[in-house]
Amino acid sequence: MRCGCSNCGAFMVHAEDKEVCVCPECGYRCTACLGTDTVVSREALKDLKFVPWISDDIDEARASLEKSENGEETGWTG
């Protein structure tokens, strides 16, 4: 993985045999781009099918997303 250090802006590289990127300039360690510690439940994944990713009406899309987050059936068939 390659990314910029959020601390100093230098180019960071993935550390071998570890789930972390290390900045060679300041030594800052980061796992943001690797997705570690970001477990998504099965229910949350299933709810994504009800999210209207493309919508002309942003207010309608926001309301639909709030309904799906609250566990209500949205009826979205997109």
Image (cartoon, grey):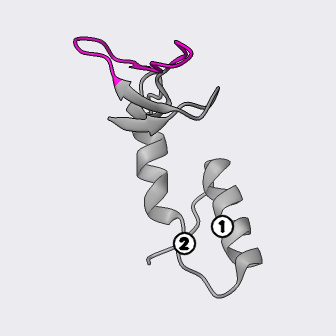
Task: Pick out the residue farthest to the bottom.
Answer: 56
Circle number at residue 52? 2
The residue located at (73%, 67%) in the rendering is 63
The residue located at (68%, 48%) in the rendering is 70
How many numbered callouts?
A: 2
Residue 61: percent from left, percent from top: 66, 73
Task: Pick out the residue farthest to the left.
Answer: 17
The residues tagged by marks 1 and 2 sit, at their Cα atoms, a distance apart of 7 Å
Q: Which amino acid type corresponds to the residue marked 2 in the rendered image? A: Pro
Query: In the structure shown, which secondary structural element does the residue marked by tag 1 occupy?
Result: helix
Question: Dominant secondary structure of the magenta stretch?
Answer: loop
| Residue at the spot of label 1 | 64
Of the numbered discs 1 and 2, the one sitting upstream in the chain is 2
Q: Is residue 17 magenta?
A: yes
Q: CB atoms at circles 1 and 2 under 8 Å apart?
A: yes
Residue stretch in magenta: 14-29
Q: Quadrant of the C terminus?
A: bottom left
